[in-house]
């Protein structure tokens, strides 16, 4: 069921404004055939020329568009300097109304171009269908392009131009929800390592549960990879690392660890390296982003530790990889647990809670209830200490000086952090990152 129709007039010359009335009528006639219970919303994309260029033509085009609003309900004309800007504006309108099934009516020669824009600015949450723009019978002045051929691919340089256009547009957008903020641990020596934990402020993601510095894109969320890359660029700029040498774990809620420089597994929740200038990272949105640093051997690691990964010992597996691959002494390794859901909020079913109870009864509160409260952090600390990490080399929410506590509860601080537990399936993600300074 088509929920919205986008009519692409972006390439229509402004001097053909006299034909636009009939042209829109002809195109919108096809929307009546959409099998919707209610009429779909209609968005018309038009090019907004620079004020200093063709100003008279631009002004003469507006009356035709304005008059047309009375002919069709739920119509909005979106004018912008670039296709990226116009399409991203329309995406915001779709997201505001929670729409995801869209028909695009456009000139045949624009179809392959539009698909590149869509690939960059949308995710698999959205469904698109395309229809060639049918010219009105009296639009004799319109240029008719060559018919669209299925299977055509754009030249690489055209794709690169579109990609650059999108990047430049996203870079021009203002930051949302305040300044970008990074939390840092006093345990990790900043003379050797660059590290931090991101928060949710200072990015460009606008969907409420993803706003604003979301750092993960998936087929189930509405934030596209292009937006996530721009958020990462802003984080990298603020933190001082190179986003081109950034590497994030491929989470599987397991205990596999990737040794950088060796064959990369299909999925892994831990990563270790001794390469200078390479930033490694682990995501977290309730799960614990754990950072590891050995200032003696100059080795670092990152791990994503959810409840399954915690039970499987992903943090200890990361420590073991540092010891076996780089000759680290376990007593030299420093470990910092980042923002994550706390024992104040996090619950698991009774069967899963039993596994944490076996680690230590203090890891579970209200054990006899159907969904006991779980302390992932305590369980992680116990397992790390059992694996040989010195208690004083672990920083978590047990620190005496609360001003030094960066292991805050993600669910309790909606202004600072994303939380799957709190926000549901369309949740945002923050990261913990670390690199060895050159």
Image (spheres, grey):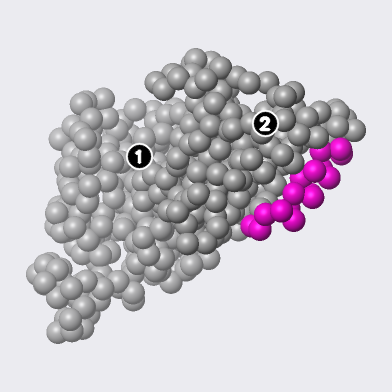
Residue that carries the numbered disc 1 in the rendered image: 248
User: Residue 364 shows which numbered tag?
Assistant: none
Residue at the front extreme?
137
Q: Residue at x 50, y 36 (%)?
A: 131
Rendered residue at 21%/35% (across/down):
266
Seen in the image, is 168 located left or right of residue 392?
A: right
**Element class at badge 2:** loop
Where, by quadrant of the figure, is residue 129 drawn? top left
Q: Under tag 1, what secondary structure?
A: strand
| Residue shown at 74% from the left, 41% from the top | 21
Q: Quadrant of the C terminus?
A: top left
For the stretch drawn in magenta, what is the main secondary structure? helix
Callout 2 environment at 10 Å: few (<14), some (14 to 19), or many (20+)? few
Q: Is residue 202 above or below residue 423?
A: above
Range covered by the magenta-colored residues: 59-74
Residue carrying label 2 = 137
Nearer to me, 419 or 293: 419
The x, y position of residue 400, in whole percent, is 39, 69
């Amino acid at each position: 069921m088509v929920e919205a129709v986008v009519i692409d007039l972006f390439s229509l010359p402004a001097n053909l404004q006299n034909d636009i009335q009939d042209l829109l009528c002809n195109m919108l006639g096809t929307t009546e055939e959409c099998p919707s219970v209610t009429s779909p919303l209609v968005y018309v994309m038009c090019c907004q020329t620079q004020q200093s260029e063709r100003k008279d033509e631009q002004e003469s085009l507006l009356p035709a568009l304005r008059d047309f609003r009375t002919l069709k309900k739920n119509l909005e004309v979106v004018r912008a300097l670039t296709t990226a800007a116009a399409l991203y504006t329309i995406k915001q309108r779709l997201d505001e109304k929670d729409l995801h099934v869209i028909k695009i009516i456009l000139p045949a020669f624009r179809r392959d171009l539009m698909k590149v824009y869509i690939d960059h600015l949308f995710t698999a949450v959205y469904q698109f269908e395309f229809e060639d723009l049918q010219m009105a019978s009296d639009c004799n002045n319109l240029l008719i392009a060559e018919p669209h051929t299925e299977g055509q691919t754009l030249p690489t340089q055209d794709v690169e131009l579109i990609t650059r256009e999108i990047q430049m547009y996203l870079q021009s957008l203002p930051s949302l929800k305040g300044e970008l903020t990074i939390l840092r641990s006093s345990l990790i020596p900043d003379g050797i390592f660059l590290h931090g934990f991101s928060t949710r402020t200072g990015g460009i993601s606008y969907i409420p549960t993803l706003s604003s510095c979301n750092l993960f894109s998936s087929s189930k969320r509405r934030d596209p990879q292009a937006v996530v890359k721009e958020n990462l660029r802003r984080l990298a700029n603020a933190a001082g690392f190179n986003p081109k040498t950034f590497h994030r774990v491929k989470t599987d809620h397991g205990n596999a660890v990737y040794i950088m420089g060796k064959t990369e597994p299909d999925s892994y929740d831990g990563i270790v390296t001794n390469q200078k200038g390479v930033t490694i990272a682990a995501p977290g949105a309730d799960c614990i982003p754990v950072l590891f640093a050995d200032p003696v051997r100059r080795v670092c690691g990152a791990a994503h530790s959810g409840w399954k990964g915690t039970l499987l010992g992903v943090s200890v597996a990361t420590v073991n990889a540092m010891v076996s691959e780089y000759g680290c002494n376990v007593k030299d390794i420093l470990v910092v647990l980042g923002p994550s859901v706390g024992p104040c909020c996090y619950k698991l079913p009774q069967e899963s809670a039993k596994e944490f109870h076996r680690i230590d009864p203090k890891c579970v509160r209200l054990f006899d209830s159907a969904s006991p409260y779980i302390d992932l952090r305590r369980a992680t600390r116990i397992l790390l200490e059992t694996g040989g990490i010195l208690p004083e080399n672990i920083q978590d929410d047990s620190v005496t000086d609360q001003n030094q506590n960066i292991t805050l509860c993600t669910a309790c601080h909606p202004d600072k952090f994303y939380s799957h537990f709190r926000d549901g399936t369309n949740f945002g993600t923050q990261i913990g990152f670390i690199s060895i300074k050159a």
